[in-house]
Every structure is written in C-alpha cells, then in structure tokens.
Amino acid sequence: MTGILGAYRGEFGRVTYLDITRPIATHAHPHIHMLFKVSGADRSMQVENRAIELHRSNWILVNPWQRHFDIPEECQAPTQMLALYIEKDWCRQRMDWPAFAGSDCAITAGMRIRVDLLARMLGKGANVDGDWVEQMVSSIMCEAARLALEDTSERAAMDFRIRRALAALRVRTKGGPDFEAVARSVGMSRSRFFEQFRNSIGIAPNMYVDALLIERAISLLGEDKPIDDIAETLSFSAQSSFTRFFKERVGFPPSSLRQAPQFSQIVQ
C-alpha cells in the first residue's frame, strides 16, 4: 500500500514524501504539481495523452486540472517520490507566471540537491523550520521556471454557463451533485454540459468535484477532528465510504496522511 514518509503544508501549498507501492488511478489537482523521484524504481505516468517516464535525472510537471495517472504495467515496484502541490496564486505573486507548460525536464544539480534534502528532512519526522521549507520550495520553483516555462495559450474564454455551474458543483450534497440537474439549471443538456466543461476546465465535472472534495478533506485532516466527523462534514453516509473514496483517489487512507510527520503544521 502507498504510504507517506513525511509531509508539510504551508502558504505555498504542500509537499509530500511518498512511498508509492501501487499504481495511482486517473486524477487531477487544482495545483501546479511537480513530481521528483527520490529512490526506488523508475515510474511511468500518463499526463493527458502523453506517456512520461520518471527517473532520477528528470522531473514531471503537471498543470492545474490536467488528468494524470500511473501506467499500471510500468509501475509495479515501489518508488519513493517527492510531490509538490503549489498554489497558483502563491506562484504568480512571486514569479509572475501566467501558466505552466505540462512537461518533463532534465533535473539540474541544484534541484537534485534540494529535492533530496527536503525528502531527507521530511522523512526524519523531526520538526522542520517552515521558513526553510518555503525557501527550498521557492528555489526549486525558480529553477523550474527557467527550465519549463514556455509560451502557452490560455484556454478559450470560459463559457458563462460553466462559470455558473462551478458554484453549484462546489456545494457538496449527499450522494454527490446531480449533474443532469446542474446542466438544466444553466440551460444545457447533460452531454453538452460535460463537453463544454471539459473544454473550459480540462477535465470532466465529476473529476472536478472529486478533486475539490479531496482538497477539502486534506484541509480538514490537518485539524484536530475525528475522521468520522470529517466524513459527516463532507456529507458522506459513513466513515467507511469516505475512507474508500479517499484511498481510491489518493492511494492511501486518510489516517495515513494525518499521521505523517509535519502534516498538521501550517505556516500562518
């Protein structure tokens, strides 16, 4: 089972040191997502329609809301990986980036040192200095900008009906949203709604809702609250349903994340 060796949350987003022992299914994040191999087996992922192999000499960059997943037959052995989940606003305020180009790039010696140092410190389980973590993340991102930032066109202007639908999809109800009702409320058929949503956001509405729910769950897991209360807050019928939902999409149960060293520490 995939496990967490260490994690830290701050204003920049979060960084997680993972021991991935099984393929991760298709998912997406609202963050700029960066993946670095620390040790173990090489790993092959698909980002949208492109297959990319992750090894010690490169790193993978995934845009916000880009679909990505492990290629199962090429991800059978354990991999220790450092994963960055960077808040877009934090990144733009410091580096003025309009967008990232999803890609893989060769890793520089400086990035390699910082990645391995972050993994080592998070894996120790001791208290780490938040300013130091943010400095490490900032320096990795600055080097990433030099290597990976390309001229990219923004998505087509979002359909105003999709903007209206987003507000409805952010409201969690028991059993999940009724996508057909949401489509009707903005004057679309279900099929047209799914098509326009993918064109505007990049993923299907159900994956968007799942990603928001995972992010909300991760935030709540950083608080001193029983997991069954979190399940109820998120409108799951039972804790077991919430745990199953979380594990299927993230690769490990919510209890593993809560127990990870440093996870509950948040930079104010």
Image: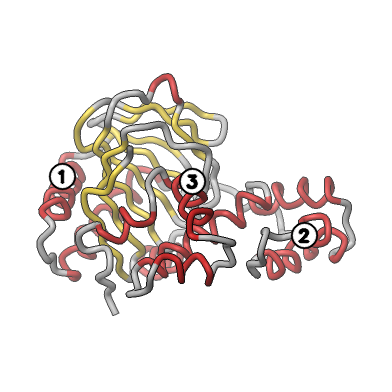
Q: Which of marks 1 and 2 is in front?
A: 1
User: What residue is pinned by disc 1?
Assistant: 116
Q: Position of residue 32 (x, y in %)?
A: 43, 53
Q: Earlier in the sequence, mark 3 or mark 2?
A: 2
Task: Determine whether 159 is above or below 119 in the image.
Answer: below
Looking at the rendered image, the disc whose residue lies closer to the viewer, 3 or 2, is 3
Which element carries disc 2, helix, strand or loop? loop
Viewer-side label of 3, 1: 3
Task: Tell me: residue 142, above or below residue 91.
Answer: above
The mark nearer the N terminus, 1 or 2, is 1
Q: Which residue is drawn at 13% across and 57% down?
A: 125
Please give the residue where the numbered disc 2 appears in the rendered image: 159
- Residue density around tag 3, few if under 14, some if 14–19, many if 20 or more, within 10 Å: some
Work out how far the residue at label 3 is from the one at label 1, CA to CA, in angstroms.
26 Å
In this rendering, the answer to whether 163 lies above or below 6 is: below
> What residue do we see at 44% from left, 25% from top?
72
Q: Which mark is residue 249?
A: 3
Q: In this view, does 212 lie to the left or right of 265?
A: right
Quick one: SS at disc 3?
helix
Q: Position of residue 182 (x, y in %)?
A: 80, 62
Position of residue 104 measured from the top left corner of the image (x, y, whole percent): 38, 35
Cα distance, mark 3 to mark 2?
28 Å
At a point 80% along the width and 52% down the height, the residue shown is 193
